Every structure is written in structure tokens, then in C-alpha cells.
Image (cartoon, helix red, strand yellow):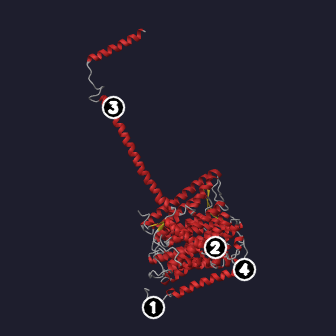
């Protein structure tokens, strides 16, 4: 680190790990809560158990993987338009 | 109570800001939106200023619930933007920012389409200086393209208005609908400013090239005036539902791979406007309320996010995700405010996006658009991914870039703090905002099911980010640009023009040579007959002349006798 003597919270890898574990716990709790909740639904898909969890996860994975492929077609050098 | 047209206060303020300096100007500029807001309160609803011109009566100021909400919103946005830019000594930026805000106010209070057109163009012309002021070659190019597109939108608007006035005989700005040429022309003009797909590129081109403070102003007004105009003219137009859903979807893919973090925000701005356009298209009270409430919240949280990135750009001189990282160590407050903005745009419970975005989504389901609802849900997860996680993560956390700078200036921190407070206030106590909406609100955001499902969506989106990052599947931030619709007019069109010039040149050369050859042949023939050796240029003996004359006279005699 460039600075001396002043450690920051995420310099300690354990804190990064803790943050990730906290996320796992939050995911697990919200999924478990779906067992005990009777949700009012406007559409039958919504009623499926864990629908939002699955959709959120899958949507983001698809988003990133598709975007990654798009890079192959769309990406150019910084000075592409400068000539 | 005495009141005046809201835009006049800002125009007068711009004039005064031009002649004052230092503390006097700062005080004046901060006081301006406050005075303006009081003026708005004193003005109240109704038609306030009419001006007869030729055969038409211009309604310069017409205030109803819809325009009042945008009026207050723009005063708030101007207030935050002004505080954020107080450290500047740049008169040009201050003055143009005030004229721009005033023009936006003029546009939302315009009671007729001619007045709307005037302010529509004033917004374009005044805002371009916020991009120009950056002073780089790139910003100059972007500002000229921006101006061209904005003025084009105005010209299309004017032609639509003229056809409209000719057909219906009126210029009042009320519901228009997609009937006939006029309806479509005005729709297209609004669509350009609103960033409809393929017409959107001016925004992602120009906003990231503006000054750190300029982008904060830009993000608040232009697109929101367009949203307002669509809400007034085209509420319930079904086409808008699909346009809005597309707008919510496609920019998030670009945002994921974009390296310039302010350009990421520009894409996410289009994504958020997509929700509003969709709500306006659905057209029910709930949907339009949702769209307008979301416009209000978006101005504040998107403004906040642009402020944080503006502060980063100002302090570090860098804005690319690939060059930043670890800034939470030196800019902890900015990082904190950025997280509040990120939570708001991602619609975390207790943050402002939560109480408005879902109104549009519920309305989509209620009105029988399940696929649109799925698209919006995808966009909600996506916006958390690119704006909620990517922006704070790559700027403030990620790998430490080693950059150590000072925290943002105090005026910037105050502006960001105020915006963050409004985000949390609107999220936790939405009823103040709800009471200002055009229709009575019968919607409860804080049901257990809504809180739970939204948390599930966001937690698992974050989980996906985590998983992709840990497995190395997440695309790294790379320096470079991604081509978009602008490619058509920055590469394809110039290439076609060059092709036409070169092919046209060849054709011209070809034609010229052929013409030259023909001319040469013609001259050759003349030369052959009339030249020194030519038959016609020969000197003939007198005898042959007399002979030919005698022959002709004989022929004449013969004809005469018979």
C-alpha cells in the first residue's frame, strides 16, 4: 500500500470473505422466507417458489455472458473514431 | 401573491450571474432556485401568461398538476446542480447552466406547441456549452453532434406543429396521439430527445464528454422534458410500451461492457427512461403515476451518481473503470453517497427507486403485458448489476489502483449529501411524493411480498456478480470503446460519402474523357473537310465554277418548261 500505517477495511482479505459470506446468508434467508410467505401475485409465474431468486440470478448471468460475446463484435480501440 | 413566469427568474439569474463574481455570484445562484420554488408556490395552477401573436394566442405559462410536479423537480435539480458546481470560476458554465434550467422550466409550463418549440431549441443551444466547456477535442466533436441532433429534433417538432396547426387549427399542447402526419412527426421529435432505440446515441456520445458538473445538469433536464412531453401528448399510446421495454433492456448490455463509468451511467439513464416511457404507454393512472414518480426519483439518484463520478473525474482526472479502483480509501464520503445512489437506482427497500419503479411493473401485469413485465424485471436485475454494483465496485473498490487523492470539495459533498438524503427520504416516506402525482395514488409499496421479492431479486443478482467474478467469467474492464448506433453516422455515412465522392469522381473523369474524345473526333472531321487539305477548302478553277453554274441554269430551264 502506498500509505503507511493506515489499514483500510478491505485490505484484510478476511473482511472481503466476510462480506461475501454475508451475501450468501442474505440469499439463503430470503429464499427460505419464500416457504413461509403467501405472496399476492398478479401472474402465475410469480407464484413459483423462488421465482425471483432464480430469475435474478439467471438474468444477470445471461446478461454478462451475452455482453461478453457482444464485445467481440462491438469493441474497438480508443481512437477508433479519431482518424 | 405576486408571481412571474418560472423561466424568467432563471433567465434574469443567468444575466446577473454573468456580471457578478465570487461570493456574490454563489449567493445569487444558490438563492435562485429557492426564490423560484416560492414563486412556483405563489403562482399555483392555472393559465398565467398569454401572448397574442399574429392569428395565434400563445400560452406561455400554463400550470397543472403534471407541469407543477416537473416544475418543482427542476428547481430541485437546479438547486443540487448549482451547489455541486459552486467551486467553479467558469462564467460560461454557470450562465449556460441557468439558461438551460430556465428553458427546461419554460418547456414544461408551455401551454402551446409553439412555445414548447422555442424552449425546446433554447435547451439545445444553452446546454451545448456544458459539453463544449470541457475544452477537449473529443468534447468539441461530441458537442457538435449533440447540437445537430437536438436542433434536428426541434425542426421535426416545428414541422409537426405546423401540420398539426394546419389540420386542427389549434396549437394548444394537450393529448396528441398518433393520428396522421402531425402526430407522428411530433412523436419522432419527442422520441429523439427521449432516446428511443436507434435515436439514443446522442446521449451516450455527448453526456460522458461534458464537464464533471455539466453532466449533472444535462442528466436532469433534457430527457425528463421529453418524458413530460410524452406523458402529456401520448399517454396510453401502446407503441410506447414496447419502445419503453426495449429502452429498458438494450442499454444494460452496453453498460456491462462499457469502460467509461459516466458512459455506463448514460446507458443506465436510457434504461431508466425506458421504465418511464413504458409506464406512459400503459397509460393507466397507476402506470402514469409510476412513470412520473420514477422521473422524479431518477433525476435525484441519477444526478447523485453523476455527481459522484464527476467528483472522481475531477479529483483523479480519470473515469475509466480499468484505471480506477480502491478510491474508498481516499474518497470515503463520495463512495458512501455513491452507494446510496446505487441502492436507489437498484430499488432497494427504503431507497427511492423501490417506491416508483414497481408501480410501472405492477401496472404492466395488471394491463396484461406479462412479457413486458418479464423484460422490465430483467432490466431491474440488470440495472442493479451495472449501475448498482459495477459503478461503486470499479470506482471505489475492486483492485487498488494506488490513486490517492483528496476527498471531493465541500460544496460537492453537500450537494451529494442532499441528493442522498432525498433518495432515502423518498424511499422511506414516499407519500410526500405520491401526493404530488397527477392522479390519486392507490398503491402500497411496502407490502411484505414486495419487500421480499425485491430483496430476492437483488441478492441473487449480487450473487451472480460474485460468482462470475470469483470464477473469472466476468469480463474485465478493458480500455476501448464499443460501437453503437452512432457508428452509422460517424463511420458508415462518412464512408458512403467518401465512396460517392470517389466513384462520382471516377464517373466524372470517365464522362469527361469520352466527351473529350467526341470533341476531338468532331474537330478532326471539321479539319478534314475545312483544313488546308480539306475538300471544302480547296481553291477551285473559275472554269469549273462557270460549268457548275451553267449546269444549274440548264436544270432550272428544264424544270420551267415541264
Question: Above or below — where is B286 with respect to B234?
Answer: below
| Residue B538 in view of the camera | yes
Residue identified by numbered label 4: A37
Specify few, some or many for label 4: CA neighbours under 10 Å numbering under 14, 14-19, or 20 or more.
few
Closest to the camera, between mark 1 and mark 2, is 2
Point out residue B278 in the picture as x, y percentages from the top left corner: 64, 65
Residue drawn at (31%, 28%), measured in percent from left and top? Answer: B529
Q: Let me know if marks 4 and 2 both belong to one chain.
A: yes
On what subunit does the disc labeled 1 rest? A
> Between marks 1 and 2, how big is the CA–CA gap?
45 Å
Point out residue B143 in the picture as x, y percentages from the top left corner: 47, 64
The label shown at residue B423 is none
Q: Let me know if marks 4 and 1 both belong to one chain.
A: yes
Residue identified by numbered label 3: B525
The label shown at residue A5 is 1
Residue lying furthest top: B561
Secondary structure under badge 4? loop
> Between marks 3 and 4, how big is the CA–CA gap?
102 Å
Amino acid at each position: 500500500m502506498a500509505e503507511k500505517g493506515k489499514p483500510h477495511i478491505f485490505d484484510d482479505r478476511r473482511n472481503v470473505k466476510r462480506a461475501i459470506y454475508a451475501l450468501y446468508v442474505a440469499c439463503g434467508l430470503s429464499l427460505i422466507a419464500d416457504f413461509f410467505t403467501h405472496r399476492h401475485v398478479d401472474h402465475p409465474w410469480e407464484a413459483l417458489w423462488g421465482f425471483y431468486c432464480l430469475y435474478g440470478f439467471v438474468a444477470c448471468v445471461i446478461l454478462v455472458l451475452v455482453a461478453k460475446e457482444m464485445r467481440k463484435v462491438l469493441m474497438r480501440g480508443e481512437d477508433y473514431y479519431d482518424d | 401573491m405576486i408571481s412571474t413566469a418560472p423561466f424568467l427568474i432563471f433567465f434574469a439569474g443567468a444575466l446577473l450571474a454573468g456580471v457578478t463574481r465570487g461570493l456574490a455570484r454563489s449567493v445569487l445562484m444558490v438563492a435562485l432556485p429557492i426564490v423560484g420554488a416560492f414563486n412556483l408556490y405563489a403562482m399555483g395552477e392555472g393559465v398565467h401568461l398569454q401572448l397574442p401573436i399574429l392569428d395565434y394566442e400563445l400560452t406561455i405559462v400554463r400550470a397543472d398538476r403534471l407541469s407543477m410536479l416537473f416544475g418543482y423537480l427542476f428547481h430541485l435539480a437546479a438547486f443540487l446542480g448549482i451547489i455541486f458546481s459552486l467551486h467553479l470560476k467558469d462564467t460560461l458554465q454557470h450562465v449556460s447552466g441557468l439558461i438551460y434550467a430556465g428553458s427546461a422550466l419554460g418547456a414544461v409550463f408551455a401551454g402551446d406547441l409553439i412555445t414548447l418549440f422555442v424552449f425546446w431549441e433554447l435547451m439545445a443551444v444553452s446546454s451545448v456549452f456544458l459539453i463544449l466547456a470541457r475544452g477537449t477535442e473529443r468534447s468539441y466533436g461530441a458537442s457538435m453532434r449533440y447540437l445537430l441532433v437536438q436542433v434536428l429534433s426541434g425542426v421535426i417538432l416545428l414541422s409537426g406543429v405546423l401540420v398539426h396547426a394546419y389540420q386542427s387549427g389549434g396549437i394548444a399542447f394537450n393529448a396528441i396521439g398518433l393520428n396522421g402526419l402531425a402526430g407522428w412527426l411530433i412523436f419522432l421529435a419527442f422520441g429523439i430527445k427521449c432516446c428511443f432505440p436507434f435515436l439514443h446515441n446522442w446521449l451516450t456520445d455527448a453526456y460522458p464528454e461534458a464537464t464533471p458538473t455539466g453532466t449533472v445538469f444535462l442528466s436532469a433536464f433534457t430527457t425528463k422534458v421529453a418524458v413530460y412531453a410524452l406523458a402529456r401528448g401520448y399517454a396510453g399510446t401502446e407503441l410506447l410500451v414496447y419502445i419503453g421495454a426495449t429502452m429498458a433492456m438494450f442499454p444494460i448490455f452496453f453498460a456491462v461492457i462499457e469502460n467509461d463509468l459516466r458512459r455506463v451511467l448514460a446507458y443506465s439513464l436510457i434504461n431508466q427512461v425506458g421504465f418511464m416511457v413504458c409506464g406512459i404507454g400503459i397509460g393507466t393512472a397507476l402506470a402514469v403515476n409510476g412513470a412520473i414518480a420514477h422521473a422524479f426519483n431518477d433525476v435525484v439518484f441519477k444526478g447523485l451518481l453523476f455527481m459522484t463520478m464527476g467528483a472522481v473525474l475531477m479529483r483523479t482526472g480519470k473515469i475509466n473503470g480499468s484505471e480506477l479502483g480502491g478510491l474508498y480509501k481516499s474518497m470515503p464520503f463520495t463512495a458512501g453517497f455513491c452507494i446510496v445512489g446505487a441502492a436507489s437506482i437498484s430499488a432497494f427497500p427504503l431507497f427511492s427507486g423501490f417506491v416508483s419503479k414497481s408501480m410501472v411493473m405492477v401496472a404492466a401485469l395488471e394491463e396484461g403485458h406479462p412479457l413486458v413485465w418479464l423484460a422490465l424485471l430483467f432490466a431491474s436485475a440488470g440495472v442493479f448489476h451495472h449501475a448498482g454494483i459495477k459503478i461503486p465496485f470499479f470506482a471505489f473498490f475492486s483492485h487498488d489502483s494506488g490513486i490517492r487523492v483528496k476527498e471531493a470539495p465541500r460544496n460537492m459533498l453537500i450537494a451529494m449529501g442532499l441528493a442522498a438524503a432525498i433518495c432515502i427520504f423518498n424511499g422511506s416516506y414516499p407519500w410526500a411524493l405520491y401526493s404530488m402525482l397527477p392522479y390519486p395514488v392507490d398503491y402500497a409499496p411496502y407490502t411484505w411480498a414486495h419487500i421480499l421479492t425485491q430483496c430476492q431479486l437483488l441478492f441473487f443478482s449480487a450473487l451472480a456478480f460474485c460468482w462470475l467474478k470469483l470464477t473469472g467469467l466476468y469480463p474485465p474492464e478493458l480500455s476501448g470503446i464499443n460501437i453503437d448506433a452512432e457508428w452509422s453516422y460517424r463511420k458508415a455515412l462518412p464512408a458512403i460519402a467518401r465512396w460517392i465522392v470517389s466513384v462520382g469522381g471516377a464517373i466524372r473523369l470517365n464522362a469527361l474523357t469520352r466527351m473529350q474524345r467526341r470533341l476531338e473526333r468532331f474537330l478532326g472531321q471539321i479539319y478534314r473537310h475545312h483544313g488546308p487539305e480539306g475538300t471544302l477548302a480547296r481553291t477551285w478553277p473559275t472554269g469549273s465554277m462557270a460549268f457548275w453554274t451553267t449546269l444549274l441554269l440548264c436544270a432550272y430551264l428544264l424544270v420551267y418548261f415541264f
